[in-house]
C-alpha cells in the first residue's frame, strides 16, 4: 500500500486538473498543519471544509504559483515530498522560489494529515526518521 501512496503523491504534483481532483484524495477529517510556514495565517486546519477555505485563501494570494516535486519517498504510513515552490504574490508582486517539504499521512488510501516543513530534516523528524 505504501508504494501506492507514493504514486498518489506523485500524481498530486503532476496534476493539471481542477482542485476537486486534489480534494478527492483528502479524508473528510484531514488535518493541515501549516504552523511551520511563514504565512500570516499559519495554523492547524481540521476537516475538509476548513482545509478548502485555508487552501483557497493561500492559492488566491498568488498571481501565479506552482509546486514541483524533486523527490517523493515512502516513510511508513506517510509520504515525504521534497518540493520547490515558485510564485509571485498577487498584491506584493514579490517572486518566491524556495524549497518546501510536504508530509502526507495516509489511512485507507486517503490523506488524513498534511504537514509542511522548511527542510527535509524537519520533515523526516516529524515522521520519526532521520537523514
Image (spheres, rainbow, N blue to C red):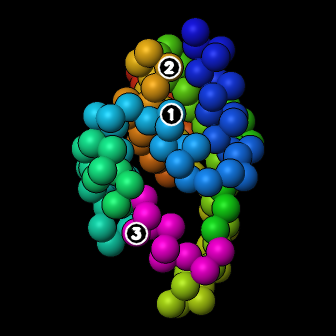
Give the residue drawn at x 30%, y 50%.
49
From which residue to which does the magenta span run? 55-64
Q: Position of residue 63 (x, y in %)?
A: 61, 80
Mark on residue 43? Answer: none
Say left or right for 6 vs 111.
Answer: right
Q: Is residue 57 magenta?
A: yes
Mark on residue 25? Answer: 1
Quadrant showing the C terminus: top right
What secondary structure characterizes most of the magenta part?
A: helix
Say left or right for 24 vs 2.
Answer: left
Q: The residue tagged with tag 2: helix, strand or loop? A: loop
Q: Is residue 126 visible?
A: no
Q: The residue tagged with tag 1: helix, strand or loop? A: loop
Separation (CA) of disc 1 from disc 2: 7 Å
Frontmost residue, 50 versus 6: 50
Among numbered discs 1 and 3, the one appearing first in the sequence: 1
Mark on residue 109? Answer: 2
Frontmost residue, 13 versus 116: 13
Q: Position of residue 27 (x, y in %)?
A: 38, 31
- Dots 1 and 2: beta carbons under 8 Å? yes
Separation (CA) of disc 1 from disc 3: 20 Å
How many marks do you count on the picture? Answer: 3
Among numbered discs 1 and 2, the one appearing first in the sequence: 1
Mark 2 Cα within 10 Å, few/some/many (few <14, many 20+)?
some
Q: Position of residue 123 (x, y in %)?
A: 48, 36
Mark 3 Cα within 10 Å, few/some/many (few <14, many 20+)?
few
Mark on residue 57? Answer: 3
Give the residue drawn at x 65%, y 14%.
3
Separation (CA) of disc 2 from disc 3: 26 Å
Q: Is residue 16 visible?
A: yes
Among numbered discs 2 and 3, the one appearing first in the sequence: 3
The quarter of the picture where residue 94 lies is: bottom right
Amino acid at each position: 500500500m505504501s508504494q501506492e501512496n507514493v504514486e498518489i503523491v506523485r500524481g498530486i504534483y503532476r496534476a493539471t486538473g481542477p482542485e476537486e481532483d486534489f480534494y478527492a484524495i483528502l479524508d473528510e477529517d484531514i488535518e493541515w498543519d501549516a504552523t511551520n510556514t511563514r504565512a500570516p495565517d499559519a495554523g492547524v486546519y481540521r476537516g475538509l471544509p476548513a482545509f478548502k477555505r485555508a487552501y483557497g485563501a493561500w492559492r488566491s494570494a498568488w498571481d501565479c504559483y506552482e509546486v514541483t516535486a524533486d523527490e517523493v519517498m515512502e516513510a511508513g504510513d506517510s509520504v515525504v515530498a521534497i518540493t520547490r515552490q515558485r510564485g509571485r504574490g498577487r498584491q506584493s508582486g514579490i517572486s518566491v522560489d524556495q524549497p518546501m517539504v510536504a508530509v502526507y499521512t495516509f489511512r485507507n488510501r486517503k490523506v488524513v494529515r498534511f504537514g509542511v516543513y522548511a527542510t527535509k530534516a524537519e520533515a523526516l523528524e516529524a515522521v520519526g526518521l532521520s537523514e
